[in-house]
Image (spheres, rainbow, N blue to C red):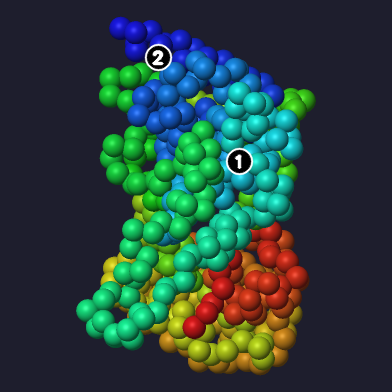
Amino acid sequence: MDNLFTERKARKKYDEAVRYILNTNPVLGVILYERLRPVADWEHDCYYTNGIVIGYNPDAVMSMSLLNNVFIIAHEVWHCLMCHATRRNGRDKRLWNIAGDYLINSLLVSQGIGEMPTDKDGNPDGLLDWDYDGRYMDTERCYDLLNDKAEKSKPKPQPDPKGDPKPDKKPDQESQGHDTIAEQFKEEIEKIKMGIVDDYVAEGENSWDAEGEETDYITEVEVTPQELEDMFNEARVHGEFSQGKTSGVGAFDFEGIMDLNKKHTISWEDILKEYLTVKSKTKKNWMKPSAKWLNHGFWMPTKTGKKLDDIVIMIDESGSMGEDEIEAVFNNINQLFEDGDIPLCRVALIHFAGHSNIPDQYVEYVDEGEIPEYRRLLNGGTDFQAAFNKAVELEERGEINPSCYIMMTDMYDEYPPEPDFPVLWMSVTPEDSLYCLPKYGSFTQLII
C-alpha cells in the first residue's frame, strides 16, 4: 500500500515537471509527450530510458525538487534525441553513458533547463566538465577522449622473469579481473545513475501501451533502430513547430547539435544495408494522412510496407574517384539482393562529371533481377546539381520512380538544394579533409 501511495504521488510530481517542460521548452516537451511512456520502476536508482519508455524511481522523484526532476527528465529526452540508445555499436556501456552525460548536462546548464541535483555540500550530483561541451562536440569524440584516458592508465604487462613462453596462456589473461574503466571512472559511474540510457531492443515487450492501461501515447512495436531515430526526429519537428508559437525559454540550436550527432562511425557496408532496408519498409504516402498524427493536429504521411522503387545511384567520375570503391559498393548491393536483405528492384545509374547537362547516353538501367556492374563512362570535374537535375528530368519523363538517391563522390563540389528524395552521401574523402558536410541526408566514408 505504501508503494502504491508513493507511486501516485511521484506520478503527480512527474506530470508537474512535464507540464513545466512543455510550457518552457516545447521542443523537449513535445518529444517527451509523443515518444516516451513514463513507468514507475523501483529497480533503478533514479531515471532511465531505452528510447521507448522513461522510467523513474518514485522515491527518487519525491526526494528531489520540481526543477531537479525537470533537469533529469530533459536529460533523458536528450539521450533519445542523440540516439544514444541505438548507436552505441559495441562501445563500453558505462563510458558511453558518461560521454553522453557530459555533453547533455553542459547543454542543459548552459540553457538553464531546470536545476542539476547537488549533494549535501552543494556539488553537482551529475557530470559537468566544460572540456566536453555538447554544443561543439559529438558523443563519439567525447567517448574517444575518455577511452584514451582509460587506455593510458592500463597496467603494462610485466615480462616473465624466467623468460618462459607459457604457450598455454591466453593473450588477454593479464587483463582478466582488472577493470580499468571501473577503476578510472569510479566517481563518474556513480553519477551517471542520475539518468541512465539503456540500449534499445526491438522486441514486442517494448510497447508504449502498458497492459490494460488506456493512454494517449502513440504506439509502435518492433521498429528498427533507424525507424526509432526517425520517429524522434519527427517529434522534434513537431516540437519546433509548437515552440515557434510560444516565447518559451531555453531554446537550443537543435539543428547544429543534431548535425554533430548524426554522423555515422560504423562501416559503410552496414550503413548502406540499413539505409536501403529502411527505405523498403517505410514508403511514405503524403496524400493519405496518418490518423494518429491528425489526432495531434499534424498532417503526416502514412507509412506502408512496399518493395523499393528505383534506387538511383549517382556516380561522380571526376579524376579523384577510384574504381575500387565504386565496385565495392556495387558488390555490396548485389550481395544485399542475393541474400534477400532488400527486395529486388530496378537500379538507375547516372554517370556525371563536369557537364552541366547530362546526355541520356550517360544513364544506365539495371532491371529487377539483374546484377549491377560498373564501367566508367566519363572523366572530368564534379557537378552535383547536374546529377540531381538529371534524376528530376528522368522522373518527369516517367523513366524512373525513385525511392532514394545514393551519391558516390569525392565531395569536392558545392552542395545543391535538398532534393525531394532521401540522399546517402558515400564519400571517398575523409571527413576531416572536408570543408563542411551536407546539411541534409546521411553521410558515410567509403574505406576499402
The mark found on residue 220 in the picture is: none
For residue 161, above or below residue 124: below
The mark found on residue 7 in the picture is: 2
Number of numbered labels in the structure image: 2
Residue at 47% across / 30% down in the picture? 47
Which of 376/105 is in front?
105
Which of 109/288 is in front?
109
In this rendering, which labeled residue sits more in front, label 1 or label 2? 1
**Is the residue marked by circle 1 packed among few (<14), some (14-19), or many (20+) residues within 10 Å?**
many
Q: Type of residue at label 1? A: Leu
Which of 293/134 is in front?
134
Mark-to-mark CA distance, 1 and 2: 28 Å
Task: Give the x, y percent position of residue 386.
Answer: 69, 75
SS state under label 2: helix
Q: Report whether 260 appears left or right of 87.
A: right
The answer to whether one can see residue 58 in this image is yes
Which of 84/118 is in front?
118
Residue at 59% across / 32% down in the picture? 125
Q: Which one is earlier in the sequence, the residue at label 1 or at label 2? A: 2
The answer to whether one can see residue 265 in this image is no
Task: Give the x, y percent position of residue 356.
Answer: 74, 80
Residue indicated by mark 1: 127
For residue 68, above or below residue 138: above
Q: Quadrant of the N terminus?
A: top left
Task: Give the x, y percent position of residue 366.
Answer: 42, 80
**Is the residue marked by circle 2 packed among few (<14), some (14-19), or many (20+) residues within 10 Å?**
many
